[in-house]
Amino acid sequence: MKCEIIRDLLPSYVDGLTSRESDRAIEEHLKDCRECRAYLDEMKQEVQKPEMTEANKKAIRPFKKVKRIIWKAVGLTVLICALIFGGLSYYYGKSWNVKSGDVNLSKEYVGKIVTIKFAPKDKNIRLYAETESGDTNVITVRASRINPLNKSNHRNAYCGYTFIDEETVLTPEGKAEQISEDDVLRIEYGDKTEELSLKEMAEEACREKLASSEDVEMTYNKMENGMVSIDFQPKLMGLTLTAEKKGEYEIEIIEHYDDTGNLPDNRGVSCGYTFTDGNTILGADGEEIKLTGQEVLTVKYRDKTEEISIKKLAEENAQ
């Protein structure tokens, strides 16, 4: 350590205000430095009387006390923060088997894929669906609290099945597996166990179903021969549409999913009317039918029913 630094520290050293490590560094330096020893001796000769030194020590004693209080307060604050953080981590990290009454269960069918959703009724918790080891048909629904400092939109839990037909399901490894009337999905809640029949889900998934209007694009196509075609095209890959006629002016749009990749070139469906003028159409037998203005084509989807005025189609065709 340089002599200049040592000499700057010597007044505090003489008054006993330096730390132990500073005392050791000063004393080591004084052993080898004659000039600094002489400087220290000269300082001691000029030092204040013992009673003045003692008075100075008494004057700084309150500041040392304040320093100790500050360090104690800092330590206590750190301890309290650690306890709070640990308590919150335990509180929000803890999970439990949720009770069935605290969960809304629903099934969504998209083609032959069935998705089972578990939604918490309490907006402050999130759910997990844990699969039992070695048995994917047994799941436990667990819950944990949502940390307000780390909110997530993923509050729901899901599990799903893909059926090939009413007798076959795909395993998570992609293998086809036969199912029987006894095969069930067992759902473990905190208060009870619920069972869902895989056979019933397979039958529902493989049953022809009405398409959702959101998955269908409807357009009009006017032809030179006076025919107006109403076209329904699927918006989703793997989806094919057909139309089932339920009456003279009523059709249902049916969806078909095919995950094999063997899809037809035209995956949509059309229906149309041939108009001879703004008030007349040709029936299926070729006979002219006069319109009264009350005729309405009813198109049924899964989520809604849409009505199209035949008279309006005729008027637009005549323009």
Image (cartoon, rainbow, N blue to C red):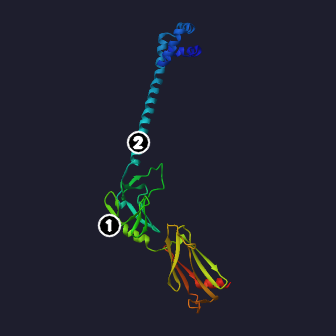
Q: Nearer the viewer, residue 137 or 300?
A: 137
Q: Nearer the viewer, residue 259 or 21?
A: 259
Residue 167 in view in this figure? yes
Residue 282 in percent (x, y) is at 59, 89
The amino acid type of the residue labelled 1 equals: Asp
Tell me which residue sits at (44%, 35%) in the image. 78
- Nearer the observer: mark 2 or 1; the answer is 1
* Lateral position of residue 256 relative to residue 91, left or right: right
Residue 213 in percent (x, y) is at 53, 72
Q: Quadrant of residue 107?
A: bottom left
Q: Nearer the viewer, residue 192 or 137?
A: 137
Tell me which residue sits at (46%, 23%) in the image. 64
Q: Which mark is residue 86?
A: 2
Counting other residues with Cα less than 10 Å from the Cα at mark 1, is it few (<14), some (14-19), or many (20 or more)?
A: few
Residue 257 in percent (x, y) is at 49, 70
Work out which quarter of the rendered image holds the N terminus and state it: top right
Q: Quadrant of residue 310?
A: bottom right
Secondary element at image label 1: loop
Numbered label tally: 2
> Mark 1 — residue?
182
In the picture as drawn, the residue positioned furthest to the right comes out as 319
Q: Which mark is residue 224?
A: none
In the picture as drawn, the residue positioned furthest to the bottom comes out as 287
Residue 200 in percent (x, y) is at 37, 70
The amino acid type of the residue labelled 2 equals: Gly
Q: Nearer the viewer, residue 15 or 105?
A: 105
Tell me which residue sits at (38%, 56%) in the image. 131
Counting other residues with Cα less than 10 Å from the Cα at mark 2, is it few (<14), some (14-19), or many (20 or more)?
A: few
Work out which quarter of the rendered image holds the C terminus and state it: bottom right
Q: Relative to 195, does residue 229 appear above or below in the rendering? A: below
Kindly report the distance in space between the C-alpha atoms of the residues bearing marks 2 and 1.
47 Å
